Amino acid sequence: MVPRLSIIILLSICFSLNAQTKSLSSDFVPARLKYAGGGDWYNDPSIIPNLMKFLSSHTNISVAKLEEIVEISDQDLFSYPVIFMTGHGQISFTREDADRLRTYLTSGGFLYADDDYGMDRSFRHEMKKVFPGKELVEVPFSHEIFHSHFTFDKGAPKIHEHDGGPPKSFGLFHENRMVVFYTINTNISDGWADPNVHSDPPEVRQKAMEMGTNIMVYALTN
């Protein structure tokens, strides 16, 4: 397990998926995944820039200031160590998309998906295309992702109620490495938005930012 607050040492490691891959010595930013199907992949445009500001002030990670957007078919996909997706509606991957996303994930890439209420059924269906023989499994509270920088002894924090009930975190694993982290019934990324967007109290936004930091630290060090 990587010691807390020592993750910066690892950020000089290159994300070497292919010859076009960028080095982590340049500013880090997770790329937002633009997907087909009609879902609002673009919602809450302030979330990634705000999370990057939090990362910059609470870690020594050198981060970019603006969001970057990538499609699975883009050549630049393999330049990003982390991709992020969210939304309320339908997601659709072509067979080529699914194959390429699987290659990205099994070659060192990481996907964080946050259900913004309404994408769960579609997301699970499309991930079956990406990993036909794998299942999303609930991630135990003891997993490193909940302790990689900040400590969440009870797993992902509750940011929004939606249907009520506890927040849930799921993962897809390849060769003992979690390559997909998926949260539902929590909507962590809404807590990264500008304060006036969802009117979350500061303590709730703080927890969302801390969990977001954990996710990025975990993705960069595993």
Image (cartoon, rainbow, N blue to C red):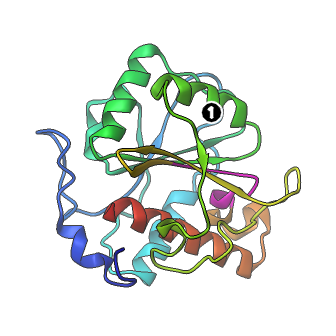
**Is residue 89 in view?**
no
Q: Tell me which residue sits at (56%, 80%) in the image.
A: 151
In which quadrant of the rendered image does the N terminus lie? bottom left
* Number of numbered callouts drawn: 1
Label 1 secondary element: helix
Q: Tell me which residue sits at (61%, 22%) in the image.
A: 37
Whether residue 185 is in magenta: the answer is yes
Q: In the displayed structure, does residue 57 sit left or right of residue 2?
A: right
In the image, residue 130 sits, relative to residue 219, either above or below, namely above
Query: Residue 214: x, y in percent?
Result: 49, 70
Q: In the displayed structure, does residue 52 sit left or right of residue 61?
A: right
Q: In the displayed structure, does residue 55 sit left or right of residue 36?
A: left
Query: Residue 222: x, y in percent?
Result: 33, 60
Residue reaching furthest to the top: 95
Camera-nearest residue between 171 and 14 = 171
Question: What amino acid type is highlighted by mark number 1?
Answer: Phe
Q: Tell me which residue sits at (74%, 61%) in the image.
A: 197
In the image, residue 210 sits, relative to residue 164, either above or below, namely below
Q: For mark 1, what is the residue?
A: 123
Q: In the displayed structure, does residue 122 sit left or right of residue 26?
A: right
Report the span colored magenta: 181-190
What is the crowding at mark 1: few (fewer than 14 residues within 10 Å), some, or many (at least 20)?
A: many
Camera-nearest residue between 31 and 169 = 169
**Is residue 34 in view?**
yes
**Splitting the image into 4 quarters, where does residue 76 fall?**
top left
